[in-house]
Image (cartoon, coloured by chain):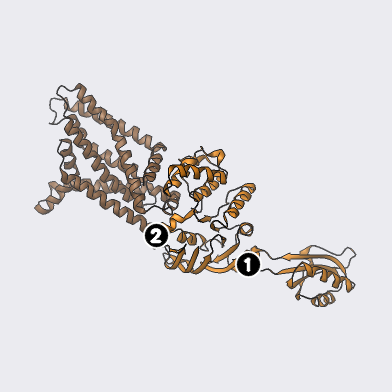
Chain colours: A orange, B brown
Amino acid sequence: MIRLHRLRKTYAGAVALESLSLEVERGEVMGLLGPNGAGKTTCLRVLTCFVPPTSGEAWVDGLEVRRHSQAIRQRLGYLPEGVPLYPELRVTELLRFSAGLRGLGSRQTRREIDRVTGLCGLGEVRRQVVGTLSRGYRQRLGLATALVGDPPLVVLDEPTVGLDPNQIREVRQLIRDLGGSHTVLLSTHVLTEVEAVCSRAAIIHRGRLVECGPVDQLRGGTHTIVVGLRGEAGRAEAVLAGVTGVQRVEPLPSAALGAAGDAGEPVVWLRLHGELDAGHCEAVAVAVLGAGMGLQQLRLDCSTLEEAFARATAGSRVET
Amino acid sequence: MWVLTRRELAGYFFSPLAWVVLTLFLLVQGYSFYIYVELVNRPDAPRGTVMQFFFGGTFLYWLFVIFIVSVITMRLVAEERRSGTVELLLTAPVTEAQVVLGKYIAAVLFYAFLWLPTVAYAGVMASVALSPLAWGPVAAAYLGTLTVGAACIAVGLLCSVLCRNQIVAAVLTFTSLSLLLLFGALEAVVSRPGLRRVVEYLNLFAQMEEFASGIVDTRRLVFHFTLVLLCLTAAARALERRKWR
């Protein structure tokens, strides 16, 4: 559905996108992650035909953005950053305007207004003036305008900003529901949103694509096991290094973990690295107890998207 | 395109600015109408009818046309750029030309709406004047006011596309139209025949005096239409270029 090939965009000499290549399949919900100024919004603006690429190509549904701007705009619904809306209009008037821009007839417009107000929970404020809406309702209205006409591609820039936790859950569910029948590209700072909603994610840093793939794969898929035990540190390390699957044993500072042995004997904290999963916890427990050491704590640490994001964008401030 | 015109008109009528402009416009036009009636009733009054003075006989007419056009065009695109709604508009399946034309038609309709109540002044003159009112020159004057206003609005729209700040857009429009108006004043000082003909052709003062006298010269209409076409084309191109920057 979306194909970016060596996309480059500069603004007055400043590079916003540099050789960005990315593909999004039809029906996929793709998250676009990156720190501030990474080029996410520029990428969305190129795709929505708002700014042209300096070089490279951007295709939407087999159409190139510079040559087929009108046809592409007909196929997409866009929620821009900051949700710009006309404050003097009523909610239904704004949705009617949006439908009018898409060339919908009056009957279809009425049907679409009913559909999107229901989808986005705007029923209570249908007659309200946009300028008097709360931030959450404005966000939902922005989303509703993007969905008018049921476009096959939905591009959302920070879709849950300003929503309360319940609204966030509803909007995330809505985006999940759009997946399959729609292609959704969403840019966000909220990593948990990507984990909750997206099937794939791309991390952009300084205009370049640094990571792209299924969310599970981006997390790294590797887990570590943290063990707290009572015994002699050198012996414990040797015992645990022998457990199948453990590739490296890393001693952890016990002070950082805030624990001490209740019998006066210090607790040794170790992190086990390797191709580990929950099944290895049992083997580790058997090894510790078999060596006559006391097991204080044992837990499986799953790597997070946040860690992957921090790794990929190392060297810049990370916003989560 | 009509959907854009409708939204723009809603923008005018739902904002207090439009009603303030309408009130001030009618207040000043009513006052100037009263002055012209007083003037014509004086024994040493210059030749001409009240309606002739009302439409372009003095600088007051032009001051208000330029001022009103600057105010009603300043927000057209500059406000959309400031609020960010231009992104919503230009990523919708409409062309830049449709956006420009839709906004332009709305501004012209609003301008015509401002002038509409002044038809009552002609009605007043028809009912109280001793000699019957010549409706032909009045109709020609309204046609001139509409086409001159339409040309000025096109200039204002272009200025609004070029500026992000609506106050700057209004100042630019006011300055551009003032220069265009003052260009006609050169007619008195230019002696070269070729240049004099150009200045004469572009003289807005003379144009409105003609319309107010009941003369509808198609060359004037062609000039207004050409100015509209040039400015709207430039506005559409500028919008496209600025959008793509």
The residue drawn where x is 17% and y is 36% is B212
Residue holding disc 1: A218
Residue holding disc 2: B244
Residue A215 visible at all: yes
Secondary structure under tag 2 reads loop
Give percent across and percent down for residue A41: 50, 59
- Residue A80 in the figure: left or right of residue A309: left
- Is residue A69 placed above or below B108 in the rendered structure? below
Residue A317 visible at all: no
Q: Which of A63 and B102 is in front in this view?
A: A63
Q: Nearer the viewer, residue A94 or A307?
A: A94
Please determine if labels 1 and 2 lie on a single subunit.
no
Secondary structure under tag 1 reads helix
Q: Which amino acid does label 2 sit on?
A: Trp
Q: How crowded is mark 1: few (under 14 residues within 10 Å), some or many (20 or more)?
A: many
- Residue B235 in the figure: left or right of residue A113: left
Report the mark closest to the observer, 1 or 2.
1
Give percent across and percent down for residue A309: 61, 65
The residue drawn where x is 19% and y is 36% is B140
Marked residue chain, label 1: A
Marked residue chain, label 2: B
Check the picture and name the quadrant holding the C terminus of chain A: bottom right
